[in-house]
Image (tube, helix red, strand yellow):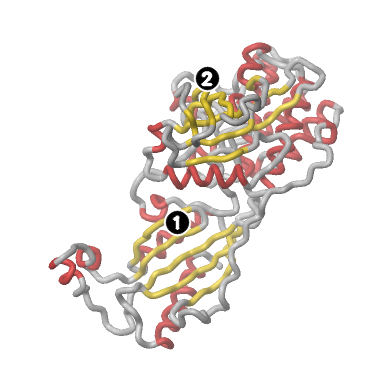
Amino acid sequence: MVGTTALGKYRLLRSLGTGSTAEVFLAHPLKFPDYPVVVKRIHDTVSEHPKFRQFFEAEVRSMANFNHPYAVRLLEAAVDDPIGPCLVMEYVPGITLEEFLARHRSLQPERVGRLLGYLCHTLQAAHDAGIYHRDLKPANLMVLHADTDRESLKVMDFGFAGFASKPHIQLAELTGHGPIYAIGTPRYVSPEMIRGDRVDSRSDLYSVGVILYELLTGRLPFSYAVQDKLLAAHINESPPRFSRIGCGFITPALEGVVQLALSKYPNERHQSAQELAVMFGHALGENHWEATMPEGWESRALKTRAPEPAPAGRAPADPFHVTYVFEAFLPERLAAAKLRGFVEDYGGQVVTSEPGVIRMQLGLPDGYKEASQGSGIFGWFAARRPSVPQGHEPIELELQMDKPDPGQPRLCVVAAFRPIKDYPPKDQRQWHDRCDKLHLALRQYLGA
């Protein structure tokens, strides 16, 4: 790749490193060679995944909608570039925390506290904007002005993070078929990601706990070479006490903050990045949160809002398009199980499931899929689709879901019912009665 051009205007100069999802290059704009940038080129093995475009667009969206002094900025991106999908980001002169640790092995607690302040300010702003990182590790943290009194930190790769406010119930969870995908780095991944539970901002705090443990002690809390044992340890084992690994000089108060961040379940940990930083500072008798606060910065994170739905039972454009709005108070994983039961009990099938949106079809007659295929003379037969009695026309249901508060199991749901084009209903009142009943049943399944 060195010597090629990305997006038609960035010459790749040299590789800066490679990871599980991408290779990162130092590059310069052809028109402004004195202003280097970083080009992140996604590996072919990743881009060939059937859901890649969705995840790539989520990465670009999350980075474009988040701006913070302590986070590396996205400049532009392209999914169909000749060299492959890539992102262009600001160049930050410095070394990764991974390289920094290789140089120092461990750091004094006061120094760790200051770096934690920069990290937690970034995470708090991202979490407030509804964005989780999900892959925090030393390789994704850049130390600026290392070993000077200006030492600070920037967070890289808010990639494949996506918006926390758009719950993503995966298709496999709704159908019972296919794998459920998780992301993260095994040495730093949270127990809930391994278990397949829904994650929120507190998953990032677990990863921060692993990083703090490593910064203070010079080793990871779990260091199994076999990945299965490593993942099982995150779920089942307690990290070794500092006194057992030769770090008894670290105060019990400070160790308690780290051990709390490494709790197995989110509700047992600190509940925000700010709380973690403040508690760490209190254990040191310092106020790193205030000391590292960006001067004159105001959040420019864009808040997304669902479009205002039409009042229930009324749709000016289409009288058969019926929309309802309600709230459900349950975790996303439980919502997935409940929705799966609803689909099965009402003879439905899930068509797509993407962040914030699930589309399903209810009551399709047997043979509909087969009859819908074909062209030419076969297309003529396809037009003779299985008939259904009046009042039993199949229904398409689209669920739009938002999660206003990432820390609470509260879902705002917009349920939109509409006819399937091949089976237009005839009786508007009868259609609305059917939609009303399905809406009430859906609410009962979700406990709304």
Q: Amino acid at mark 1?
A: Ala
Disc on res. 97:
none
Where, quadrant-wise, is the C terminus in this rendering?
bottom right
Specify whether 375 is left or right of 85. left
Q: Is residue 311 visible?
A: yes
Q: Is residue 333 visible?
A: no
Residue 264, given in percent of the width and then of the height, sits at: 59, 36
Q: Which callout, 2 or 1, points at the residue further toward the start of the chain?
A: 2
Q: Is the C-beta separation of discs 2 and 1 under 8 Å?
A: no
Residue 347, given in percent of the width and then of the height, sits at: 33, 67
In terms of image quadrants, where is residue 361? bottom left
Disc on res. 337:
1
Query: In percent of the image, x 68 and y 19: which residue is there?
Result: 242
Q: Say what secondary structure mark 1 lies in.
A: helix
* Picture layout, residue 7 above or below residue 318: above
Query: In percent of the image, x 56 and y 54: which residue is there?
Result: 166
For discs 2 and 1, the disc positioned in front in the rendered view: 2
Residue 6, given in percent of the width and then of the height, sits at: 49, 32
Specify whether 263 is left or right of 25. right
Disc on res. 14:
2
* Picture layout, residue 305 above or below residue 208: below
In terms of image quadrants, where is residue 362? bottom left
Marks 2/1: CA–CA distance: 48 Å
